[in-house]
Amino acid sequence: MGFKEKYAYRKLAKLIAGQNRIPEVPTLVKHSKVGVIWQPSEKPVVQFLREHFNKQGAIFREYCIFDADSNPPVEANSLTVVDLNWWGIPKPEKVGDFLEVRFDVLLNIALEPNFAVDYVTALSKAKFKIGCSPNDENYFDLNIKIGENQDAMYLAKQQIFYLAQLNKNSN
């Protein structure tokens, strides 16, 4: 990890320390708000999740975080290298709207870890955050270990499964 990335993570830690967030186990009902953070290679998985949650009547919103190697079209719900400051921190005007939405659940299906993904995940005002990280230190309320199976569709199906289990237990 280089100097710029260490600085960015230190700054993120300070922002997280300023939050007063208590996770809430999601109860997915009609009109629940579901957010998804993803990377370009996971587009079919996002479509799968959109169809799944739309069938349940959920409000679905996605946010794509592109890596340095891609040249994406500019979209409202995406973050590109151009949208980062010199330290690699996302510019507030680009991520502010997504971070302020109080999702009932935020699914992170990004398999390639990077600072921008961590930033958006950590600072989201979502009530409950689910993702996959090999690190013990992560920004999820529920961290799903997928081991050798590094596949976004597998992760998405596991997230749906565990959400269903949590909903059974909370009823």
Image (spheres, helix red, strand yellow):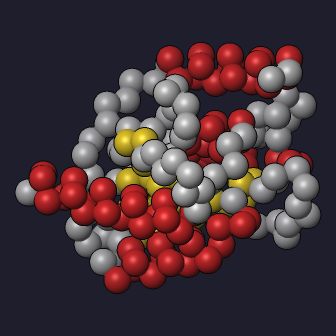
Using the image, determine if residue 42 lies above or below residue 24: below
Farthest front residue?
Answer: 148
Residue that protrudes farthest toward the left in the picture: 171
Identify the image quadrant of residue 37.
bottom right
Q: Is residue 33 left or right of residue 139?
A: left
- State the quadrant of the C terminus: bottom left
Give the percent coordinates (x, y) of residue 81: 86, 48
Tell me the quarter of the image containing the N terminus: top right
Image location (x, y in percent) of residue 87:
84, 28
Q: Residue at x 14, y 59 (%)?
A: 168
Horizontally, residue 11 falls left or right of residue 99, namely right
Left or right of 25 in this view: 112: right
On the image, the x and y values in percent for residue 133 come to 54, 40
Q: Count every numbered label the image shows and give the total.
A: 0
Q: Evaluate whether residue 109 shows in this view.
A: no
Q: Is residue 56 above or below residue 80?
A: below
Give left or right: position of 44 versus 143: right
> Residue 107: percent from the left, percent from the top?
47, 55
Q: At x 55% / y 37%, what residue is drawn?
A: 134
Residue 139 at least partly seen: yes
Q: Residue at x 65, y 72 (%)?
A: 43
- In the depicted view, which residue is nearer to us: 67 or 101? 67
Identify the residue at image location x=61%, y=42%.
120
Q: Quadrant of residue 10?
A: top right
From the viewer's perspective, is residue 160 above or below residue 115? Answer: below
